[in-house]
Amino acid sequence: MAWFRRKPEETAGRPQKVNIAEGLWIKCDSCKEIVYRAEVERGGRVCPKCRYPFRIGSRERIGLLADAGSFEERQTGLTPADPLNFKDSKRYRDRVKSARQKTTLEEAVITGVARIGGLPTVLCVFEFDYLGGSMGSVVGEKLTRAIELAIDKHMPVIIVSASGGARMQEGILSLMQMAKTSAALERLSEAGLPYVSVLTDPTTGGVTASFAMLGDVNVAEPRALIGFAGPRVIAETIRQPLPEGFQRSEFLLEHGQLDLVVERRDLKETLRRLLAFFADQPTDPPPERA
């Protein structure tokens, strides 16, 4: 077989193919730029071009918020049943099995106790990769037990939401968790204990319509999608164009539905200051020892 070099005129005008090593680069869902993965990781999984925070898992979130080695998981061993024997394109129990294999979690939320800046708190973090972070009976039970633990131990509660809402495969049993978790938070309030709600992308449906918007302080990450129905459904219902940035955290802050929008790199310190405020302690960090 003869090897030959193409003439310059044969390759002129053709785009040069660029081979990119798989995994080294990542595309931002917001600005659509191709960015270096290592730079994204160094920035706490935030786009270096537009500062959009990528979605992260529950364990990674706990690692970013809780003091090292301080998180102790509670309410383990609770797993979802299939009370309605539900089946659409796939059986519900098969979806649950796949979600467990994908995330190695028993349900869509991890609950436990932790310290943030040395201050104790009950911390609950959603896992969106587990059936879209949807709230079924076990999720509602775990959150309720976590809130009851906070009342018993006289601790504040932080819930980090990332959810598509109530879990349709459990029907009315899933919708009942909205009232259940809201009632538990009312008992927390009666005990004089604070609740900080952290909303991340996305927080929608029955989760938004219940505990996610009931915080004494509601905090969100930048550009998080937050709402009940999706923007497309709303636009088709009212038959009007929606405002720019509708249902994003900055829009909600401007319209009084959020208290703070905080970049991911500042979130732990913001939560520490809030916990210190509610604990009637100095909000400034203690000076470092020489």
Image (cartoon, grey):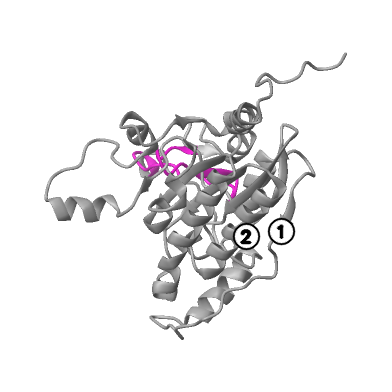
Residue at x 15% of width, y 43% of height: 241
Does any portion of residue 220 appear in the rendered image? no
Q: Amino acid at mark 1?
A: Arg
Q: Which residue is farthest right?
A: 290
Q: Which residue is farthest top?
A: 290
Left or right: where 64 falls relative to 230: right
Tell which of 33 and 72 is nearer to you. 72
**Prevailing secondary structure class for the magenta stretch in the rendered image:** loop
| In the depicted structure, whether residue 276 falls above or below residue 169 | above
Q: Are marks 1 and 2 in contact (CB under 8 Å)?
A: yes
Q: Position of residue 283 (x, y in %)?
A: 65, 21
Q: Which of the 4 image quadrants contains residue 75?
A: bottom right
**Which quadrant is home to the N terminus?**
bottom right
Q: Position of residue 140 (x, y in %)?
A: 53, 63
As drawn, the label of residue 145 is 2
Circle 1 residues within 10 Å: few <14, some 14–19, many ≥20: some
| In the depicted structure, whether residue 180 falls above or below residue 249 | below
| Secondary structure beneath label 1 | strand
Residue at label 1?
Answer: 74
Residue at x 74% of width, y 38% of height: 67
